[in-house]
Each structure stands twice: as C-alpha cells, then as structure tokens.
Image: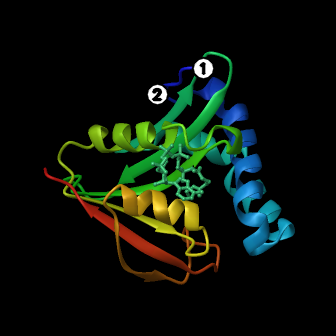
C-alpha cells in the first residue's frame, strides 16, 4: 500500500485518536506501565483534545493515508512570531507499519511546512530507543532534558534539536 501525506481534518480525529492509543500502548506500556499510558492517552488523545489542533495558528497537523486507513500522524507548531523554532509535538506510525518510510515522509512534510524555521525541536523518552535512533538518523542531537514531557505529564525526557538551513 502506498501512503500519502495530507493535512488532517475533523473526519480523521476518531481514527487518529485510535491510532495514538494503540501506538502509545505498543511503545510505552513496557516503560511507563499500561495504566499510566491509558491515563495519558485518554486525556491527551481524545477527539475533543485533538480538535483544538485543527484551528491552532502556526501549526501543521498531518496524517499518512492509503485511502483505507490512517497509518501515521504528526503535529508540529511554532510559538515564535517569526516561525524560527518549530516544536515537533508528535510523530507516531502504527506498529504494523513502522520501518517503511512513513515516519520519514511525515517528518519531511513537517519541515517543509515551516520554510523560515532554523531549528526543529522535540522531546523523546530516552528508553524509546527506536525513536531515538530514528531522530539521530535524521540529524537530531540531544541538547538537554525536560522533567515534564509534553508540559503536564511529570515524565522526564530528552530534548533533541536539528538545525535547518533556512
Ligand atoms: C519513530 C517512528 C515515528 C519512525 O517512523 P517509521 O515510519 O517507523 O520510520 P521510517 O521507516 O521512516 O525510518 C526508519 C528508520 O528509523 C530508525 N528506526 C525506526 N524504528 C527503529 C527501531 N525500532 N530500532 C532502530 N531504529 C529504528 C532507523 O534509523 C530506520 O532506518 P532503517 O530503516 O534504515 O533501519 C515510528 O517507528 C514510531 O511511531 N515509533 C513508535 C512511536 C514513537 O516512538 N514515536 C516517536 C515519539 S517521540
């Protein structure tokens, strides 16, 4: 199946919510425990929570779609007026579809959506070695740590950045 990257719409929110729930359990149950994962994913990835992204200014909310299912999702936003710094808030590919280039396609589209950006930054769980490898392979370097991944989780994470040639 060929996946194409496109902008997410209201009709996708239910499918994105399910994808994030499944992928979060597959990725983080062994690290945080299934109960903590359920708690976070129920709150962060409800359709209502995801809906706020549709109207967020200076943001890019995209999915990879093969006309039958949504295989991956990415959400990035810039909070500075000149759009120099982009935060990649989320990049998730369904466990059945990982390693086929979907994550790379989503990341490339996010970068292309912010042509004035000089830096892209993200937070990643250090025990999530697959994701760490993915970001390193795509030119990201560790620049520090946060004690509160995502802003309100109380979970520590590594902060990675990549310079962009804007
Ligand atoms: C990380 C993720 C977004 C990458 O997307 P993807 O579609 O699987 O990645 P791609 O196929 O585009 O790229 C594959 C490359 O990523 C790296 N990679 C991805 N998963 C890996 C793993 N489990 N172990 C080691 N390297 C991995 C490798 O460099 C790989 O290159 P290779 O195929 O030449 O070995 C995806 O695997 C995913 O959603 N993982 C679970 C959720 C997650 O951790 N998201 C990021 C949270 S911050």
The residue under label 2 is 5
Q: Nearer the viewer, mark 1 or mark 2?
A: 1
The front one of 122 and 135 is 135
> Residue at coordinates 78% horizontally, 69% vertically from top-left?
30
Q: What crowding class fits label 2: few (fewer than 14 Cα within 10 Å), some (14-19), or many (20 or more)?
A: many
Q: Position of residue 152 (x, y in %)?
A: 61, 72
Which element is circle 2 on?
A: strand
Q: Secondary structure at mark 1?
A: loop
Q: Quadrant of the N terminus?
A: top right
Residue at image coords 64%, 29%: 70
Instruction: Give the vertical position of 124 relative to 45 (above or below).
Output: below
> Across the whole image, how many numbered discs are drawn on residues?
2
Residue occupying image coordinates x 72% and y 64%: 28
Residue 151 in the image: x percent, y percent?
Answer: 54, 71
Q: Is residue 136 left or right of residue 39?
A: left
Q: Nearer the viewer, residue 142 or 88?
A: 142
Q: Position of residue 18 (x, y in %)?
A: 75, 40
Q: Mark 1 vs ligand 1: CB under 8 Å?
A: no
Residue 11 located left or right of residue 111: right
Q: Residue furthest left?
A: 166
Looking at the image, residue 134 lies above or below residue 75: below
Vertical arrangement, residue 38 with respect to residue 127, above or below: above
Q: Are marks 1 and 2 in contact (CB under 8 Å)?
A: no
* Disc 2 within 8 angstroms of ligand 1 (CB): no
The x and y percentages for residue 47 are: 70, 41
Q: Quadrant of residue 12?
A: top right
The answer to whether 125 appears left or right of 109 in the picture is right
User: Is residue 162 visible in this depiction of the protein?
Assistant: yes
- Crowd around label 1: few <14 · some 14–19 · many ≥20 (10 Å): few
Q: According to the image, label 1 marks what residue?
A: 1
- Label 1 to label 2: alpha-carbon separation: 13 Å
């Amino acid at each position: 199946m060929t996946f194409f990257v496109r902008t997410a719409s209201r009709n996708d929110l239910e499918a994105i919510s399910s994808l994030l729930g499944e992928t979060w359990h597959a990725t983080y149950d062994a690290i945080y425990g299934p109960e903590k994962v359920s708690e976070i994913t129920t709150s962060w990835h409800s359709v209502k929570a995801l809906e706020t992204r549709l109207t967020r200014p200076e943001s890019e909310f995209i999915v990879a779609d093969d006309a039958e299912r949504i295989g991956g999702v990415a959400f990035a936003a810039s909070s500075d007026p000149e759009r120099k710094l982009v935060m990649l808030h989320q990049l998730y590919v369904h466990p059945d579809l990982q390693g086929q280039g979907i994550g790379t396609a989503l990341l490339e589209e996010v970068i292309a959506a912010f042509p004035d950006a000089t830096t892209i930054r993200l937070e990643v769980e250090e025990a999530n070695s697959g994701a760490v490898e993915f970001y390193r392979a795509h030119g990201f370097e560790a620049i520090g740590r946060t004690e509160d991944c995502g802003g309100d989780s109380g979970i520590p994470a590594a902060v990675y950045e990549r310079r962009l040639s804007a």
